[in-house]
Image: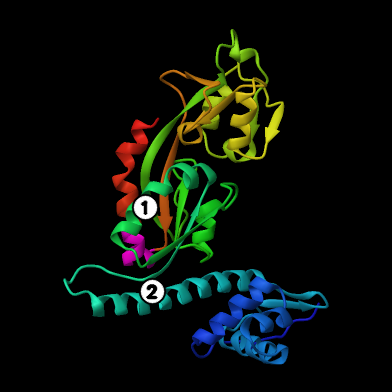
Amino acid sequence: MTTTVPAPAPSGDLSPQELRTLVAVAAEGGFSAAAAVLGTTQSAVSHAVRGIERKVGVVLFERGRYGARPTAAGTRAAAHARRVLRMLDALAAEARGAGVAADGGDTVAGPLRIAAFRSAALHLLPLALERLAARHPEIEATVRVVREIGPGTAGEVAEGRADIGIATIGTSSPVPPGLVGDLLLEEDYALVHPVGHPDPRSLPLVDWTENCSSYTRSWWDQQEWIPCATVRAEDDGAVLSIVAGGRGMAIMPALSLTGAPTTVATTDLGPERPTRAVGYVTTPELATTVAVRALIRELRALRPVALRAR
């Protein structure tokens, strides 16, 4: 692999087009592929990247026969570039909105990118988005389901791929440094099993990887009656289907049980039962924008509804 050695000291600001080039190369993994996305030539992209590296004073991509792979610095730079470009979009959208707001209220048009784990996307966001659309019809909200494993939804926000994330937060998974967020609801876990089973704790345990990262592990480890999972499913929907078919038990949070089949029953796990804290995360700069603030308001308004559904 070869790399271009930049100047030893940074010099000059990056233009929006340079930021777009940086993001495109990081996303596409090569200069030619990035050039196709940007509508330019491979040599122009290569030249632009060399200029970017000179300005920031560090190598951002490792060049090789299979493309251009971001260095650690390149990964960090691309995340910042996405966030800066998003704020430039927000600047234009909110300035236009302020110019047309006859009553002096908040108005805005444009995209709102949301990352959410599966049960939140299915059971928490729809009503919030319905209310958001009624109050701000020009906001174009899109939701991407992200597995809450590793960086999860918060990682999508930190990397600049989402404006706001619905995430599991709390003492075991705090809001990551550099982001802001708050709690929306705390949902209980329950033992889930087939209706009418005489001894549900004797059934095989069904679990999914995403679940293991979100509940209180200390509680789990103290329960001698809970066996190791013998069935691993792709997601909570698959777990619920297996339990509904009478083939196992599971320990699941309330959101995952929304609309559960009538063949599924739940048993309270007692006063020391684990809970899952669900909240939102965003960047400090996007937290002040009209679209993000509007969605947060709708999510907070739904808190009593979500708690009643537990």
Q: Crowdedness of circle 1 by 10 Å Cα count: few (<14), some, many (20+)?
A: few
Pick whichever, 297 or 219, lies toward us.
297
Mark sitting on residue 217 = none
Instruction: State yes or no: residue 40 in magenta.
Output: no
- Please name the residue that numbered disc 1 is placed on: 130
Q: Residue at x 22, y 74 (%)?
A: 101
Q: Helix or strand or loop: what does disc 1 sit on?
A: helix
Q: Is residue 179 above or below residue 206?
A: below
**Percent of width and height locating residue 174:** 45, 47
Residue 304, percent from left and from top = 30, 37
Quadrant where the N terminus sits is bottom right
Q: Is residue 303 above or below residue 42?
A: above
Identify the residue under disc 2: 90
Residue 172 to residue 17: above or below: above
Was residue 293 drawn as part of the magenta stretch in this picture? yes
Point out the stretch of residues depicted in magenta: 284-294
Q: Earlier in the sequence, mark 2 or mark 1?
A: 2
